[in-house]
Amino acid sequence: MDKKTVTTISYLSRLKIDDEKEEKIINDLGNIIEFVDQLNDVDTSEIDPLANPLEKTAKTRKDIVTAKNLKKKLLEVAPSANEDYFLVPRVVE
Amino acid sequence: MSWETVIGLEIHVQLSTKSKLFSGGSTEFGAKSNTHVDLIDMGLPGVLPVANREAFYKAIRFGLATGANINQTSSFDRKNYFYPDLPKGYQITQMTQPIVEKGSIKITVDDYEKEINITRAHLEEDAGKSIHDMFEGETGVDLNRAGTPLLEIVSEPEISSAKEAVAYFKAIRQLVTFLDICDGNMAQGSMRCDVNVSIKKSGDKELGTRAELKNINSFKFIEKAINFEIDRQIRLIENGECVVQETRLYDSEKNETRSMRSKEEANDYRYFPCPDLLPVIISDKELKEIKENLPELPEEKEIKYINEIGLDESEAKIISSSKTMANMFEAASSKTNDAKLVAKWLVGDISALLNKDNIDIDESNLSAENFGILIERISDGTISGKIAKSVLEEVWETASNVDEIIQSKGLVQIQDESILKDIAKKVVESNPDQVSAYKAGKDKLFGFFVGQIMKETQGKANPKAVNEILKDLLK
């Protein structure tokens, strides 16, 4: 784990890391990765990848519309909205 | 130097389910903003997505129709990225176990046919819509579309020209509309496509660096965008520069593609299995049922029209090429005994009107019922083909009933021989010069007499009867 990796993943997850904490986070993340990396010692070449640890299959829905119009309530709890849209800082392509 | 073009398409097909892929929110198009948003579509904490089985069924129909493998166990993954119209911060998609793999579809370009392999087709949810130009310094977000089921169809990079790309897109559109899994409406964004374009020296095995053109939604723009991009890449390489792997946006107004740097920076989606969703298993019984209920496809219809109804090959091809056309043909044919005449009118006058107005037949004023009546009136001799044309034009404008138009305008064909004979006699008597010329061997003048009688009767004379009577009179 190095500074560059931490900068990249903090950008990808839109998390701001204070400069004074950076050293500690690099260290902590390094330790976590090292701990989890122990799993790589297990030989899994004969085992299929697992999509979910529960040995069950999904319950599914019939194609029926059940939702109500929640527009007013949803827009009310948004950090910023007008009467029709959620509003966010301008995104320009 | 000669160059080869290598193109692969990713087509997003909006599946025509009533509700969304993971929630009971409605997928209806054109609703007021943010009125079809469920808590699950919003990605609020504590909600759990539940997959819509119908979306799987529709995807499977596509798989079966393209001879693909159906993965009866398929699972969902998360594709992580941040954008305001993606409320959860990830899109649920199928990365490792897509529902459909390894199919193919036949395309026709000018004078040749080609088989294009389909790598995979997987289910995923659509994002919402961002509105950039309505608010000062802010972007508005409408989440109605968020969670709508998409089938992403990925082709192998086997397409070698803009023309082939268009033909492939058209073939996919034809198929999904016949399968009734998508309405195929391009203007409403029911089908959108991303195009990967690269070039290589003729004969080279290795592929060149590709550029991805995003979100093109019309046949015309696919062709233009690809052709622009091919030229751009050739120019770069011939000037000793390199093609950069990047996402480019096609600007239809300027007819150019340009780099979308914002997307380039973070092309790391960190896929992982979605812990909220268990694998979905489709039983053998379900698969068998879908197979048995697969609708008739264009090729099957074409063969049926030729062998069972006796249409010409070209007529059969035109009619079976569009679902709305085939539906109209079958519905109108069932109302008359003369399917061939139905076909003749569909391919002729009606196609011409459709082209003129640039619409689909289901958008026109002509109903199958009314069309069937029109054909009946032609075959039972009530009106002539010529009058039928003007009746059709009237229906086209006003959607009025064919019989009512015939009655109210007095268009019923004159069949009564004694009336026709009287008119014919008058015409012959008042044109003595033409009569002697005809008798002297100028056979072409026969048409002149027919024309005069038609003029007298405002086109209502039965042409067959007129021919007989004239032949008799001019002997």
Image (spheres, rainbow, N blue to C red):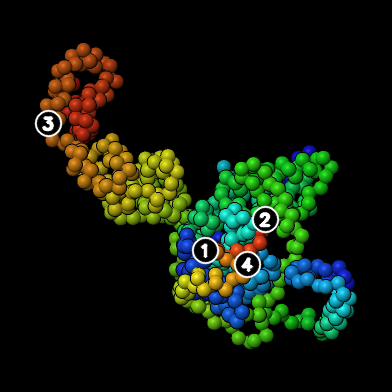
Q: Chain of mark 3?
A: B
Mark 3 is surrounded, within 10 Å at the Cα level, by few (under 14), some (14 to 19) or many (20 or more) other residues, namely: few
- State whether discs 1 and 4 lie on one chain: no
3D distance between C-alphas at marks 1 and 3 = 71 Å
Q: Secondary structure at mark 1?
A: loop
1 or 2: mark nearer the eye? 1
Please identify the quarter of the rendering in which residue B398 is found: top left
Please identify the quarter of the rendering in which residue B229 is found: top right
**Quadrant that contains the C terminus of chain B:** top left
Asked if the residue at tag 3 contacts the one at tag 4, i.e. Cβ–Cβ closer than 8 Å, the answer is no
Tell me the residue at 82%/68% (across/down). A7
Mark 2 is surrounded, within 10 Å at the Cα level, by few (under 14), some (14 to 19) or many (20 or more) other residues, namely: few
3D distance between C-alphas at marks 4 and 2 = 15 Å
**Residue under pointer 4:** B86
Looking at the rendered structure, the kind of residue marked 2 is: Val
- State whether discs 2 and 3 lie on one chain: no
1 or 3: mark nearer the eye? 1
Asked if the residue at tag 4 contacts the one at tag 1, i.e. Cβ–Cβ closer than 8 Å, the answer is no
> Can the viewer see residue B344?
no
- Indicate left or right for B473 with B24 as reference: left
Give the number of the disc on residue B419: 3
- Indicate left or right for A6 with B16 as reference: right
Q: Is residue B318 above or below residue B93?
A: above
**Residue under pointer 1:** A84
Q: Chain of mark 1?
A: A
Mark 4 is surrounded, within 10 Å at the Cα level, by few (under 14), some (14 to 19) or many (20 or more) other residues, namely: many
3D distance between C-alphas at marks 4 and 3 = 76 Å
- Asked whether A82 or B317 is in front, the reply is A82
2 or 3: mark nearer the eye? 2
